[in-house]
Amino acid sequence: MNPETIGYFAAFFTTVAYIPQAIKVFREKHTTSISIGMYAMITTGIGLWFIYGLMIGSPSLLLANGITFVLALSILIMKIRHG
């Protein structure tokens, strides 16, 4: 099996995992139980994975981490705004 195929499967599951939290945060604007430290670190890590994907030319890393970065950053911004 092609490693990029496994990468696309991993990308799908890890990216889709953020969608329910993002929807919940945007609907309720309630972020009290979300750790700002965790979201700051995970957003930074996802951004670095995206850069790594650019450096090695991996479409699956770029797709997954590009979308996940936007979702995680959105949650982080909502946390900063709404505490």
Image (spheres, rainbow, N blue to C red):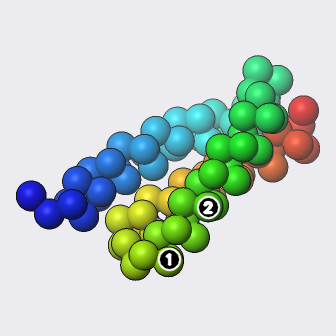
Residue 82 shows in the view? yes
Look at label 1 and name its amino acid: Leu
Task: Say the numbered circle drawn on residue 54.
Answer: 1
10 Å neighbourhood of mark 2: few (<14), some, or many (≥20)? some
Q: Quadrant of the N terminus?
A: bottom left
User: Between residues 70 and 62, which one lies in front from this camera angle?
Assistant: 62
User: Between residues 36 and 58, which one lies in front from this camera angle?
Assistant: 58
What residue is drawn where x is 54% and y is 60%? 49
Task: Find residue 31 and report its image quarter.
Answer: top right
Look at label 2 and name its amino acid: Leu
Q: Quadrant of the C terminus?
A: top right
What residue is drawn where x is 81% and y is 35%? 36
What residue is drawn where x is 52% and y is 36%? 20
- Mark 2 or mark 1: whose residue is earlier in sequence: 2
Task: Find residue 57 and report its image quarter.
Answer: bottom left
Identify the residue position indicated by label 2 in the image: 48
Image coordinates of residue 55 in percent, x first then y, are 50, 77
Disc 1 is placed on an element classified as: helix
Image coordinates of residue 46 in percent, x first then y, are 59, 54
CA gap, disc 2 to disc 1?
10 Å
What residue is drawn where x is 65% and y is 44%? 42
Image coordinates of residue 3 in percent, x first then y, are 21, 60
